[in-house]
Image (tube, rainbow, N blue to C red):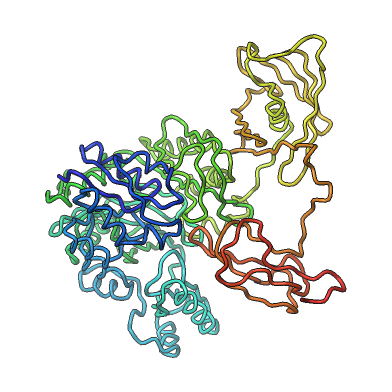
Amino acid sequence: MFDTILIANRGEIACRVIESARALGVRSVAVYSDADRDARHVALADRAVRIGGPAPADSYLSGGAIIDAARETGAQAIHPGYGFLSENPDFVEAVEAAGLTFIGPSAEAIRAMGLKDAAKALMEEAGVPVVPGYHGETQDPEHLSGAADAIGYPVLIKAVAGGGGKGMRLVERPEDFMAALDSARGEAATAFGNAAVLIEKFIQKPRHIEVQVFGDGTQAVHLFERDCSLQRRHQKVIEEAPAPGMTEEMRSAMGQAAVRAARAIGYKGAGTVEFIVDGAQGLRPDGFWFMEMNTRLQVEHPVTEAITGVDLVEWQLRVASGEGLPAAQEDLAITGHAFEARLYAEDVPKGFLPATGRLSHLRFPAGVRADSGVRAGDEISPHYDPMIAKLITHGASRSGALRRLATALRQCEVAGTVTNLAFLGALAGHAGFAAGDVDTGLIARDLDDLVVAPAPGPAETALAGLAALDLLAPAEEVAGFTLWAPLTRTVLLRREGAEIEVRVQSLGPDAHDVEVDGQTVAARRIGGRWQIGGEAAPPVAVTGDLVTVFAQYGLGFEIVDLLKRDPLAAGDAGVIEAPMPGLVKAVLTEPGAEVRAGDRLAVLEAMKMEHALLAARDGVVAEVLAAQGDQVAAGAALIRLAEDGEAAA
């Protein structure tokens, strides 16, 4: 076993690897960018080394700096985590050339699965079923159109070097093929530097089921399946293991196919073989096809660990250090059911816009595994993925595990940034999902019902007002309360731009009557706990001028300082602002251009995603205030539309 390893990653996966290494008595070295100097993974590691600036290209994608850090600290091996350099074969070769061990597969195995068309051809040779389609090298548009006709519509155009849904288009009619092809190629060229595509048959009721495999370079086993069908724009949201409705016959067929895939490339370490499954007529052994293989540990690996009792990171370290497979296939079994929900800082009602902010309060409920790379007080950086945590629950049955997940989501407390907690809670309570009737289109079909912005009632607003006035402290801590003190107090709160006046009549330290929107809410402390309107009060956090009531997955209120109010403050639909810090990827207009509401005016790159900035109204562009390549702050004015009668600059 290694004495010291370096983790070439950040956030929750770096923390996850450090914990398993520590359990084995292995020292860990963290690397960090300037933005992560005070991050949780830096604090957890035995040693930490700075590797560059905040941008990933200057730090976590800098293979040379990472290898230098490993040498400097005496690490014998490098664990890549996932993302960044985890599937970069050139980095693997550089690690090995430096005399270090890469905790993962060989460069050859990564290359074999790196391009979807070549990987599918290899899988066909290995006897793994693949989706009917065209995976050839000819990229002539007419040839591709003919291939689509032969496969039969609907078809899916996919970037050969793609991932995350980029360079992917669904085409339902032959007359739409050429336009979709141009769009997919353009996006693929921008995202991956490779415009080549493949064509596949589109499955009508697709399910995304993947199989966890583990190899030692010669032999391989599978650790059963995970269902990752609950997706939005090809990004996983909630995963579970095992897959609902799975039969033993199909599980055996999928497991054997995944093992054949791993053995075909001499796979070493943890990997995932992803299959597209036709769920239209239930799960059947002839209804699944190979999509791709992820040659690394997956984000959703904890659900597999929960149902098998296996620490996959421990297995990675053992096999990389020269040990054989820790278990034979017959030694592995499924116990119970598990779910994982991905908690993000994002504004769901505004189109799942990634958010920044300082986590003023963070608490995860007892009885749930929370894999997180942040703590209360940490900043959600615009430079990286805005994940806050992965919440994992396990139960004896699927329904029991899902109830635990729903409860955990309700009890999770996050303040300082908007989150997708309410969205996750709506999914956990979705009737079809609860029944196991899932496919990759579920979220898109029911999006309007799932994305409902929580609205505080009088009780939650009254509680926020009491907290803002500091009237919730235990009675013995209330200072200065006397019979001749003012008995009525007023506080002004703001939520989502609307101001709310809260008037509190104090009857004593344990009793208040609170007036909100013409309604009176009774607040009484009984048995040491506050009751608001006759119901037990949820937890509350106050940080600076922010009050968060932990009801409906978190309701934030701003305390308005009357001395700092700007009576002229108002939104301007004529100014297009950056919704978050980021890089101006493209400016799509110019002064004098006529635009319509909804037109794309610029593209901002932030948090590993591109965000189109749209015109809020019809008009003429008066000024373009930013250029392609500019790094801008949140709220920066990028484009201004002319007022009536104004000429463009």
- The residue nearer to you, when weighing 588 against 446, is 588
Q: Residue 474 falls in which quadrant of the image? A: top right
On the rendered structure, is 625 left or right of 296? Answer: right
Above or below residue 632? Residue 532 is above
Name the foreground residue: 129 vs 362: 362
Of 618 and 391, which appears nearest the observer? Answer: 618
- Count of marks, rendered view: 0
Residue 553 x/y as whole percent: 58, 38
Left or right? Give the position of 31 relative to 500. Answer: left
Q: Dividing the image into 4 quarters, which one contains the N terminus? A: top left
Q: Which quarter of the picture shows residue 219?
A: bottom left
Residue located at (74% from left, 68% from top): 640
Where is residue 410 drawn, in percent x and y?
54, 36
Left or right of residue 432: residue 89: left
Q: Residue furthest front?
A: 72
What residue is drawn where x is 69% and y is 41%? 455
Q: Is residue 70 placed above or below 479 in the rendered structure? A: below
Location of residue 197 in the rendering, given as x and y in whole percent from the top left corner: 40, 78
The C terminus: image quadrant: bottom right
Q: Is residue 457 left or right of residue 212?
A: right
Query: Going by the picture, which residue comes out furthest to the right?
Result: 645
Compare residues 592 and 550 and report the one nearer the observer: 592
Q: Position of residue 453 (x, y in %)?
A: 65, 47
Q: Residue furthest top?
A: 483
